[in-house]
Amino acid sequence: MVGKDKTVRSLIGVLDRDIEKWALLTFYVILVVTMAVEVIRREVFSYSSVWGEEIVRYSFIYLAWIAAAAAVRERAHIRIDVLFHYVPTRVKALLYIFGDLAMLFVAVLAFYWSLETVQVSVKYGSVTDGLRLPKFWFLLAVPIGFALVLLRLVQSIIRDVRDLVQGRPPFEGNKLFD
């Protein structure tokens, strides 16, 4: 039983570290391949499809929302951090925790309201224009993205509180520009 528990924790660890990466790669490949096929069809055969444009659009939407969660995890999202250069480590940790709590509040509201849009789509049976698939599958990108953001924010807050209690400097994250 102990070996099985260790295997489950290992699997959860892999998913925790890599789920966004694999989802981002999948949606990016779908987007690029579909776009390339549509460009070839349009330029070589003078024909394009409605479904190709929809696949690219919805892949990009999923890509953006999952990337937002990945950015929160790595603290790579855009932020103004000038103040962080002038405050002690303990204050910096408290500012990160405060920022994450504020973002958590907004993400909870956004998650809640995005579910309403999905429920309306399910209730009225709306479908996409080209693919004729239930639209709620694509509208789910927003609540899924916010659910991932919420998960990453909770993880970030726990990490920051631990660092604060143990006297370690807070995780600064990855910067987009130096």
Image (cartoon, rainbow, N blue to C red):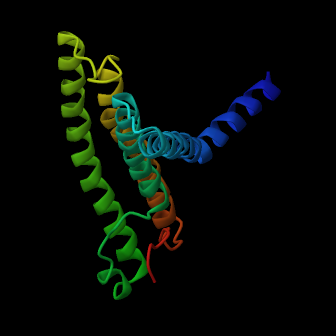
Left or right: residue 149 versus residue 9 is left
Q: Residue 85's quadrant in the figure?
A: bottom left
Query: Along the horizontal axis of the image, is 119 left or right of 88?
Result: left
Residue lying at the far front in this picture: please name it: 45
Give x and y (percent) for residue 74.
49, 60
Which residue occupies the foreground of this view, 54 or 3?
Answer: 54
Q: Give the percent coordinates (x, y) of residue 110.
A: 22, 40
Q: Is residue 32 left or right of residue 96?
A: right
Q: Is residue 93 above or below residue 162?
A: below
Q: Quadrant of residue 26?
A: top right
Name the spot of residue 38 as percent of width and height, x first: 45, 40
Of 73 and 114, which appears nearest the observer?
Answer: 114
Q: Residue at x 36, y 23 (%)?
A: 137
Between 133 and 130, the one lying in front of the other is 130
Which residue is located at x 40 percent, y 69 percent?
93
Q: Is residue 141 above or below residue 86?
A: above
Question: Residue at the bottom extreme?
Answer: 86
Left or right position of 41 against 143: right
- Whole-percent x and y of residue 10? 72, 38
Question: Which quarter of the rendered picture does the N terminus lie within?
Answer: top right
167 in relation to 60, above or below: below
Camera-side residue of 99 and 27: 27
Q: How many marks?
A: 0
The residue positioned 26% from the left and 17% from the top of the image is 127
